[in-house]
């Protein structure tokens, strides 16, 4: 009986080790250049307009651009100097993004990570009008500050196309936390917001189309 129990125990350990190894391998997703050409420049805009929701505020931008340099098969993908321009908030309000040198990272598993220097945050300032948001020196009514956090789940990546035309579509439904400053009758109180929208990331190597995928 003792011998059988020992054999059973060893078999169980082997099964658990194999299962753990298999699970680890299954989760090891990476961003890759389809044809193995590095470094590949990755860019993407908004194919479905992004909405940044925070309490009573919903912000959209006419210009939203992501860019990254895929230097090797890697994860996560570091976004370089994201652009959020010509923004507005519902109700005729203006909005202005300031990244404050915070950095965004997209994981192949579908997560968003925000990293900032000490005491910095991604900042959305809200103004009385779109015109005021574009004018230098104007004082915002209130602000929405999103500090370092994550990885936050909520991105669904889908590989599309083949060869040099391979691209990655990303549908966002991410829920970061934020704090507000200024007039809370406009921006509301601290809470959990939502980032909704869709982007398509494509690649170029030396100016020529290069496929980008997750695998």
Image: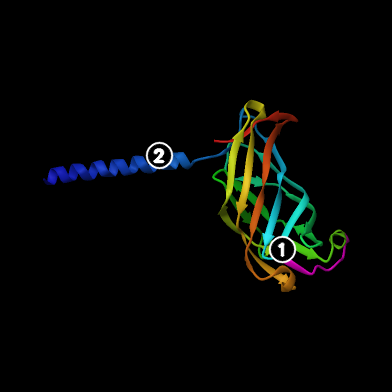
- 157, 100: nearer the viewer: 157
Other residues around mark 1 within 10 Å, as few (<14) / some (14–19) / many (≥20)? many
Secondary structure of the residue carrying numbered label 2:
helix
Q: Does 142 lie within the magenta span?
A: yes
Residue 90 lies in what quarter of the image? bottom right
Q: Position of residue 93 (x, y in %)?
A: 80, 63
Tell whether 95 sits left or right of 194. right
Secondary structure of the residue carrying numbered label 1:
strand
For residue 100, say whether it is visible: no
- Quadrant of the image for the C terminus? top right
- Residue behind mark 2: 22
Q: Which mark is residue 76?
A: none
Residue 180 lies in what quarter of the image? bottom right
Residue at 84%, 59% (x, y): give it.
130
Q: Magenta stretch: dominant SS?
A: loop
Write down the region rendered in magenta.
135-143
Q: Position of residue 15 (x, y in %)?
A: 30, 41
- Residue behind mark 1: 57
Residue at 77%, 60% (x, y): give it.
89
Q: Does 177 lie within the magenta span?
A: no
Residue at 61%, 30% (x, y): give it.
34
N-terminal-most mark, 1 or 2: 2
- 186, 9: nearer the viewer: 186
């Amino acid at each position: 009986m003792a011998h059988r129990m020992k054999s059973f125990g060893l078999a169980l350990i082997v099964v658990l080790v194999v299962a753990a190894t298999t699970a680890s391998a299954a989760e090891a997703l990476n961003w890759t250049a389809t044809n193995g050409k590095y470094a590949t420049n990755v860019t993407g805009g908004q194919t479905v307009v992004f909405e940044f929701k925070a309490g009573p505020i919903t912000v959209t931008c006419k210009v939203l651009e992501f860019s990254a340099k895929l230097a090797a098969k890697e994860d996560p993908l570091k976004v370089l100097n994201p652009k959020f321009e010509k923004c507005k908030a519902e109700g005729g309000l203006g909005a202005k993004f300031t990244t404050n040198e915070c950095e965004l990272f997209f994981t192949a598993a579908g997560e968003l990570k925000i990293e900032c220097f000490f005491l910095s945050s991604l900042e959305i300032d809200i103004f009385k009008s779109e015109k005021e948001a574009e004018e230098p020196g104007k004082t915002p009514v209130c602000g929405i500050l999103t500090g370092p956090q994550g990885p936050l789940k909520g991105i669904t990546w889908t590989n599309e196309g083949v060869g040099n035309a391979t691209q990655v579509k990303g549908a966002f439904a991410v829920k970061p936390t934020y704090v507000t400053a200024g007039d809370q009758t406009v921006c509301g109180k601290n809470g959990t917001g939502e980032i909704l929208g869709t982007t398509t990331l494509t690649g170029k190597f030396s100016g020529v189309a290069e496929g980008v995928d997750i695998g």
